[in-house]
Image (cartoon, coloured by chain):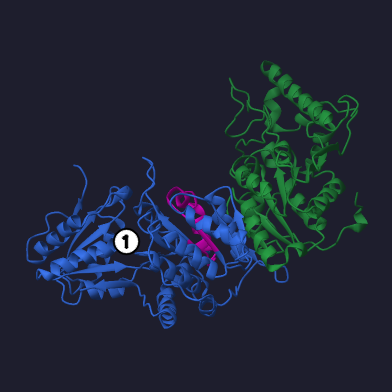
Amino acid sequence: MVTLKELPTTELFGPGHRMCTGCGPAATARMTMKALEKPAILVNATGCLEVASTIYPDTAWKVPWVHTLFENAAAVAAGIEASLRKQGKADEVDIVAFGGDGGTFDIGIQALSGALERKHDFTYICYDNEAYMNTGIQRSGATPYGASTTTTPAGSKIPGKVDAKKDLIGVCVAHRIEFAATACVAYWNDYITKVRRAAAVKGPAVIHVLAPCPLGWRFETSETIKLAKLAVQTRYFPLYEVDHEKYKLSMKVPKPAALEEFLKPQGRFRHLFAPEFAQNLEELKRQVDGNWNRIAELCGETATQA
Amino acid sequence: MNGDEAVAFAAKQADVDVVAAYPITPQTIIVERFSDYVANGEVDTQFVCVESEHSALSACVGASLAGSRVFTATSSQGLALMHEALYLASGLRTPIVMAVVNRALSAPINIHNDHSDMMGSRDCGWIQIYAENAQEAYDWTLQAFRIAEDDRVSLPVTVNLDGFTISHAMEGVAVLEDEQVSKLLGKRAAKYRLETSSPMTFGALTLPDYYSEFKRQQVEAMNVAPPVIGQVTDEFKKTSGRQYSAFSTFNIEDAEAAIVCLGSIAGTARTVATKLRSQGKRVGVIKIWQYRPFPTNQMAKLLSKIKSVGVIDRAVSFGAPYGAVCSDIAATKAMTGADTKLFNVICGLGGRDVKPSDIEGVFDKALRYARGEPVDDHFSFVGVRE
């Protein structure tokens, strides 16, 4: 684990970007730039981070940065890597692609799969705020069961999203990449350590980082880090890494806080606390438990003790 | 060699740094041959064998922004899948060269030649060249790198060749020596690139306060392309002895009726024109090489001297008065104020053979109009069951 003193004071993701107050992805971007040790080239999929950081003629990035489309960040990164390899510079530069959950779980999964399979040397970071926040909070493959979004609204008959969250890391690990990990914006040293590991491995690496969105999740902008911590401490979002296909928990949660502590401050889950949707709240709990047990088992832990 | 092999050989001689491509009939031979070059160490190229055409062009854009000379090739559905990335390449001013082996679009699925693929992406901001045969496909592919990478232009270029008719037909192709090509093309020296020592932002969000200026600059790049193309074709002639320009003409000087067309059909048109000339009929052929930027002024000058023109389109612009090529010719004609009579013929869709008799019918019609008959049929199909 890195310590604060080891981090550079330089801000390569500059102040002056136009991300929202309390934005999880903005903090993720800033920490990423502090984590990278080599000169970097960034590729950004369409999304909040892209639109709010480079409104022409301004840019918040003090590194070479490119945005092209929504679904192709991994492919653009692959092309840049091929070019640098030809120039003999591939080992001198960290190529990092940022995508939101929509740009990664959904529309960008094909390009990501292709780039992972071809073993391009780059780091893919999915900042996950669990919906299409840039277009106004629509459900994505990363939106959890029960969450209310503008395309899975909490109606009187259907209380939010009916499908479960996709296992992104599982998809990536199936490509037999050297390193994949989940992370959370609240645990900065875990995140930075993982980004450094991801950048260091030869070939592709993926980091899936939970980055709350106050606007989309509907909570106070001052609570982002607190809520992100609760996501981990309730076992809602397990922190683990997969190094050479070997799963390992990064943080054990032997005495989890009640899931309600994470859910209640968020407007997107409020309807689940109405008596008529009690069974849906139970289903979400079952899914959270099931996912934790599955991950703990993959990590060789006993679920309840982990 | 066939047309695809000629293109692959040109890309090899151009010493491209990065190729990112995906197979599709009838383009496949290009990526296969290029893969052979890579596998046998005949090129020093990073070949990225991507999982889709969308990623192919996306990777090409990334590589080009990083400063590399980049080549790719596609066809039909592949070009359609690339559609949004086509605009990226032109908007980000990446000088990618792409061979488009023209093929019909689904549905119904058809693997044979027409121009609906490229015409469907006509307004994507790329320079668009159409070749008539394997020799032209080879020659234009080489020239395309110089045109695209010229700082004044900095636009991507497609070299179009008709699927199967050119791509798979074996022909004699006169090729240059490697040294001649490297002298002609040099190395790419990218003015703006992803470079860690001088960080730049590419692809920023551009709102109504600046977007129009970006588009205006792309128009300007298209406007300065013709003289650059002229310089490149002149230099190419010095090396190869073969002269190219925006379009070629055949027996046009005293022609009262002419056919305007793109691609391989021009050969048939010339053969038929020769036969009709021997019968004393004053007919000629205009074959467009440089479809974008459209050679409006030169074409206007030429058209004003011809009484009647039949324009062949190998793609339908559904619901429009004409196909794409004829629309351009009509607009050009309108600018001249000339009273050239104009009609559009759609033929050769999905690889339908266009016979000399079909072309003769077009010439006959053009001659009738030239001799004073009113244009009673502005838009028609040839060789189609009605």
Magenta region, residue range = B71-98
Give the chain coloured blue: B
Residue B296 found in image quarter: bottom left
The image position of residue B21, as x and y in percent, is 55, 55
Instruction: Please give the residue where the numbered disc 1 appears in the rendered image.
Output: B264
* Residue B12 located within the stretch drawn in magenta: no
Q: Nearer the viewer, residue A164 or B344?
A: B344
Q: Secondary structure at mark 1?
A: loop
The image position of residue B324, as x and y in percent, is 31, 57
Question: Label 1 neighbourhood size at 10 Å, few (<14), some (14-19), many (20+)?
Answer: some
Residue type at numbered disc 1: Ser
Name the residue located 69 percent from the left edge and 20 percent from the top edge. A280
Does residue B206 show up?
no
Does residue A38 show up?
yes
Left or right: A245, with B249 as reference point:
right
Residue A256 found in image quarter: top right
Up the image or down, A275 lies above or below A271; here it is: above
